[in-house]
């Protein structure tokens, strides 16, 4: 995951075929464009499209660019719109997330609640109030975990997370052969589970276990804080 602190609004113009040139504001943070027209985004429903059609400016006209907000503990996360994706299997790709949520295993963006409330005050769009944001669920954490996994070790994002034990060659603590059943049990238990979870920074006495993947360079994958808590970058335990 990657934390959102400050943001930048960049003026831009879009040439809409039916209403001519329209002035919009692009939303940038951490060197990444989050929205091509944040002033047109509609947060009235459970999901929002951050990448608006650049031909007509109508929300929902173009495929992709959809997100949902979730909260857990002191944090607010911007996750793919999993509920919308699941509700419309007849529209493959329509509710896909922006590419920056899924590329390079950087994971989903998140705010501390204080930063989120500051964005609420300063953005030219009405963000949902904290108390109206749905809690983060075990299944949504598992999908975020899948995004962060290197070398697609949990499969493609469009598929349920599945771990191939033969892709793991070692662990930082003990035997990977003993750790893998624990991880597989957690994955199975959290898959399609709508139980709210709690996200908190790892403590000084916590030990994060890494697995090593059988691909070039043997990349390191941080997975568990203990058998009941998954790990998400850059230092969170999820229970």
Image: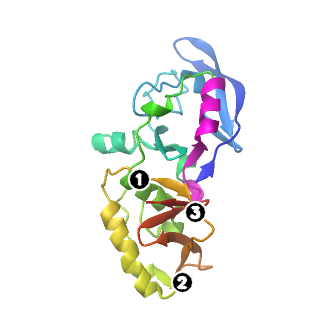
Q: Position of residue 177 (x, y in %)?
A: 42, 86
Q: Which residue is mark 2?
A: 173
Query: In terms of image quadrants, where is residue 9?
Result: top right
The residue depicted at 47 percent of the width and 84 percent of the height is 176
Q: Nearer the viewer, residue 201 or 51?
A: 201
State which region is magenta: 103-122
Helix, strand or loop for disc 3: loop
- Residue 157 falls left or right of residue 112: left
| Mark 3 surroundings: few (<14), some (14-19) or many (≥20) residues within 10 A | some
Q: CA distance from mark 3 to mark 2?
A: 17 Å
Q: Is residue 36 visible?
A: no
Q: Is residue 158 above or below residue 228?
A: above
Q: Residue furthest front?
A: 205
Q: Which residue is mark 3?
A: 202
The residue depicted at 54 percent of the width and 68 percent of the height is 150
Q: Position of residue 144 (x, y in %)?
A: 47, 55
Say which quadrant the N terminus sits in: bottom right
The residue depicted at 43 percent of the width and 31 percent of the height is 132
The residue depicted at 63 percent of the width and 79 percent of the height is 217
The numbered mark at residue 197 is 1
Q: CA distance from mark 1 to mark 2?
A: 25 Å
């Amino acid at each position: 995951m990657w934390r959102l602190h400050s943001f930048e609004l960049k003026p831009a113009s879009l040439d809409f075929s039916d209403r001519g040139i329209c002035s919009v504001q692009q939303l940038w943070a951490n060197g990444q464009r989050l929205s091509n027209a944040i002033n047109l985004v509609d947060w009235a429903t459970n999901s929002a499209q951050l990448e608006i059609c650049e031909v007509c400016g109508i929300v929902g006209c173009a495929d992709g660019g959809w997100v949902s907000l979730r909260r857990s503990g002191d944090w607010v996360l911007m996750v793919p719109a999993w509920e919308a994706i699941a509700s419309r299997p007849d529209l493959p790709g329509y509710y896909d997330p922006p590419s920056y949520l899924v590329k390079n295993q950087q994971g989903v963006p998140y705010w501390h609640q204080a930063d989120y409330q500051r964005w609420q005050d300063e953005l030219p769009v009405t963000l949902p109030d904290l108390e109206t944001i749905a809690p983060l669920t075990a299944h949504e954490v598992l999908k975020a975990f899948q995004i962060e996994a290197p070398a697609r070790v949990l499969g493609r994002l469009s598929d349920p997370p599945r771990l191939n034990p033969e892709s793991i060659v070692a662990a930082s603590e003990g035997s990977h052969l003993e750790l893998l059943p624990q991880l597989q049990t957690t994955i199975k238990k959290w898959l399609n589970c709508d139980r709210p979870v709690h996200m908190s920074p790892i403590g000084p006495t916590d030990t994060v276990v890494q697995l090593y993947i059988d691909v070039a360079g043997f990349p390191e994958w941080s997975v568990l804080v203990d058998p009941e808590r998954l790990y998400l970058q850059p230092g969170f335990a999820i229970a």
